[in-house]
Amino acid sequence: MAFLSMNSAIAAHCWKTLRLIATDMDGTLTRQGKFSADLLQALEHLSAANIPVLIVTGRSAGWVSGLVNYLPVQGAIAENGGLYYPADKQQPVFLSTIADITTHRQQLADTYQRLKSEFSQIHESADNRFRLTDWTFDNRDLTTHQLERLNTLCTSMDWSFTYSSVQCHIKPRSQDKAIGLIQVLRDHFPQYQPEQVLTVGDSPNDASLFNPQLFPLSVGVANVLDYTDELDYKPAYVTVATEGDGFCELVEYLHQVGG
């Protein structure tokens, strides 16, 4: 990884290919868990520059359905690729194939109880009740070894497992951010190719967005460096600042490149 800079070669490459930004939310757009005035201004600058923004988050369907109506974005993917909320529609588009939501939720609950029998310290996330496709519990004081064990257990029960700076996720095997984003681009933004999309993130559940074979242009805000050894793929560039300040740094950089 290299730090994002004003290097002219990087600048030319970024501005030549960039048409859309797909970004994580928690730890990437937020600052200490909150949206800042600077972040909202940065999103407005992108809108004025005709660079659409998609949020790609692990947060729940319930939370994202509200956010997409208030932020200046084109849409939002929730639950690590489970659903898509277009900004101009009220109903979500399911990206994962789930035959029956009630049965699916019960199966997730059963899996969580099996995990809890070994990890009694885990607690269901506050937003889990507002979820449809995945199940979450708080990522509090879990070691890397414990997270690996949780991944092994979920895999043995035919589920996928991932985690961010705030939550752990039990989800369908084929559900992740990159798969969901590619599907949304194909169905809702066919004018954009993956190589024209700048992906931004900060955590292990963003790793698929850093896959250079899918998205060659990717940026991690500086706190991604906390997970360097845990990422399957690493971002092409890293900002100097952390969290939402890093995203604002990126937007300012792109503004300067664009003249």
Image (tube, helix red, strand yellow):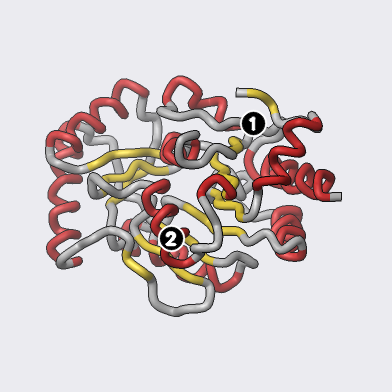
Q: Counting residues from the N terminus, which is met first, the one under dot 2 or under dot 1?
A: 2
On the rendered structure, is 238 left or right of 142? right
**Could you tell me which residue is drawn at 32 percent across and 65 percent down?**
94
- Classify 70 as above or below 158: below
**What residue type is disc 1 on?**
Val
On the rendered structure, is 220 left or right of 209? right
- Bin the neighbour count of mark 2 within 10 Å (Cα to Cα): few under 14, some 14-19, many 20 and up: some
The image quarter in which residue 114 lies: top left
Where is mark 1, residue-wise?
A: 238
The image quarter in which residue 199 lies: top right
Residue 107 screen position, x and y as percent = 13, 54
Say what secondary structure mark 1 lies in.
strand
Residue 56 screen position, x and y as percent = 48, 53
Residue 182 screen position, x and y as percent = 42, 53
The residue at the far right in this view is: 259
Residue 221 screen position, x and y as percent = 62, 36
Check if mark 2's residue and mark 1's residue have beta carbons within 8 Å: no
**What residue type is disc 2 on?**
Arg
In which quadrant of the rendered image does the N terminus lie? Answer: top right
Say what secondary structure mark 2 lies in.
helix
Q: Which one is closest to the eye, mark 2 or mark 1?
A: 2
Where is mark 2, residue-wise?
A: 186
**Could you tell me which residue is drawn at 44 percent across and 79 percent down?**
90
**Could you tell me which residue is drawn at 66 percent across and 36 percent down?**
242
The image quarter in which residue 200 lies: top right
